[in-house]
Amino acid sequence: MSEQSNKNGISPEELKNKTNVIEVETLSGIREDIFRSEIYPQRRPVVLKGLDIGPCTRKWTVDYLSKVGGSSEVKLHVCKTTQMDFISKNFLYRSLPFDVFVKRAAEEIHQEYFLDENEKYYLRALGGDPRKDVADIKQQFPQLATDINFPNLFEEHQFFSSVLRIASKSTQLWTHYDIMDNMLIQVSGEKRVVLFNPTDADYLYLNGDKSEVLDIDNPDIDRYGEFNKAVRYECILQPGDVLFIPALWFHNVISLDFGIAVNVFWKHLDDVMYDKKDPYGNKDPLPAQRATQILDRALKTLDELPEEYRNFFARRLISRIEKKTFLKPPDS
């Protein structure tokens, strides 16, 4: 078994042979206007190669980032295992000067550490005031921002945030969805991304916007018996690649190397659909929030009935929702 297989449960070669895995489409040399008019409306992930993202792929070495990125403190995730779980919170939040963090994250064995010498680090850059400011690399890391170009995949007024992400080798982030469209710009290192169609949400054992299935390559079938019914879309990102991730598509990310990336999020829906008090951009659209609140009240009201009646009318509610057919599978 290869080193990558040992660390990630299954190798890319093995994954290609699995029947429920679809390789994410890769397009090279696609003009940005063609993406916006022909590819974007399809609402499917796609890897774009050959876009001009600037000199960052060449310049963003560990030494360069530690010098140019400054020494302001950043809050990071520190974990003793490679698989970070946001539901169980199997990591700690700690702070380090940015230049110190970058050097530590690039190490595999640490001389200085919080938990142990093999701990993993993950940075999701925050706004100046995380409670109200969105992340924007142009604001938090202005010198680094001059090295990267955002491909022109959306209208300027739709921009929401640009998030610098840095992760230790082998770090795996939990499966989740975002409510905004985004492009993942891979700057350095290789990254494996596994995505799931929103129509497969019933198989992902959701807790809020996150899946409870931590080890997606070797799921506990006794607990998550339906998980393998979900079709996986997979890709390996190389430096310079841009992955378009449509809103609501679930994604799980493994850094095969020490990796640097920038996520750019933008609003696919009208402004009025989004919660203005959400600097992270991860709260459900306002109509969905209201619908959930109404459903919670309805379920609480049904609790007033005896079990036989409660079950009967709950099934009728489910039937009415299903007849709306909001979640028709897209044409293959």
Image: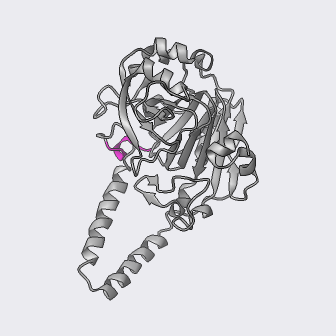
**Position in image of residue 90 (x %, y %):** 41, 46
**Position in image of residue 102 (x %, y %):** 48, 22
Name which quarter of the figure residue 91 lies in: top left
User: Residue at image x 48%, y 18%?
Assistant: 145
The residue closer to the viewer here, 70 or 82, is 82
Quarter of the image with the C terminus is bottom right
Q: Which residues are magenta?
A: 269-275
Query: Total of numbered circles in the picture?
Result: 0
User: Residue at image x 59%, y 41%?
Assistant: 40
Residue 249 is inside the magenta segment: no
Residue 313 position (above or below residue 186): below
Query: Can residue 38 be spotted in the picture?
Result: no
The residue closer to the viewer here, 191 or 79, is 79
Query: Can residue 111 be spotted in the picture?
Result: yes
Residue 22 shown left or right of residue 103 in the figure:
right
Residue 118 position (above or below residue 248): above
User: Residue at image x 54%, y 25%?
Assistant: 106
**Position in image of residue 201 (x %, y %):** 51, 59
Q: Residue furthest left?
A: 304
